[in-house]
Image: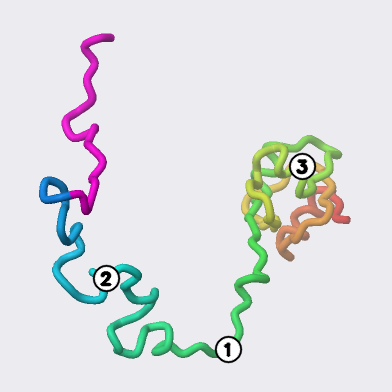
Amino acid sequence: MGQIKAPFGANTKKTIVGRGASSKGRTCGRGNNGQNARSGGGVRPGFEGGQMPLYRRLARRGFSNYPFKQDFEVVSLDAVSEKYEDGEVVSLDSLKDKGLVKGYDIQAKVLANGELTKKVVFEGLKISATAIEKIKAAGGEIR
């Protein structure tokens, strides 16, 4: 235990500026003169030296639906056949419990990938038209 050492460069001293020539004295690492060398100096975020900044050059038009979009996770009929038994209810909560859907604010959509071999009840989910046909053909129910 006494032989363990930190790798070279892991432990460095804190840089103390403006305390004489032995440290970063005089200009304190800010260069010689100019706006950034002054106390309180510097430019605001997005400033490009008088050039028209990017946030003003880009057009800001139209409507974005991004804040209102809903994310849907895909669930295939194969996965439902594997995880569920006859007569069980397939809902968003049960899909989360069985690990088929992950996430907090997420919805699920059942797609017709594979075959459904069990009579299960689908409740409160979006289901594709082809999947509806396969579910009804297997004797399942949609609520």
* Residue 3 vertical placement versus 112 (above, below): above
Judge by depth and name the residue closer to the eye, 121 or 45. 45
What type is the residue that disc 1 sits on? Gly
- Tell me the CA gap for discs 3 and 1: 39 Å
Q: Position of residue 61 (x, y in %)?
A: 54, 90
- Where is residue 51 shown, x and y percent of the image? 30, 89
Nearer the N terminus, badge 2 or badge 3? 2
Quick one: label 1, few (<14), some, or many (20+) residues within 10 Å? few
Q: Is residue 42 left or right of residue 70?
A: left
Magenta stretch holds residue 7: yes
Residue that carries the numbered disc 2 in the rendered image: 38
Residue at horizontal 74%, vertical 60%?
127
Q: Residues within 10 Å of mark 2 (few under 14, many from 20)?
A: few
**Residue 131 place in picture, x, y as percent:** 72, 58
Q: Could you tell me which quadrant the C terminus lies in? A: bottom right
Look at 65% across and 39% down and name the residue there: 99
How much space separates mark 2 and mark 3, taking CA atoms? Answer: 62 Å
Q: Which residue is mark 1?
A: 62
SS at circle 2: loop
Residue, x 82% and y 55% (percent of image)? 136
Residue 124 marker: none
Which structural element holds mark 3?
helix
Q: Nearer the viewer, residue 24 or 79?
A: 24
Q: Does residue 4 belong to the magenta stretch?
A: yes
Which region of the structure is painted magenta? 1-19
Residue beneath label 3, please?
94
Residue 55 vertical position relative to residue 42 in the rendered view, above or below: below
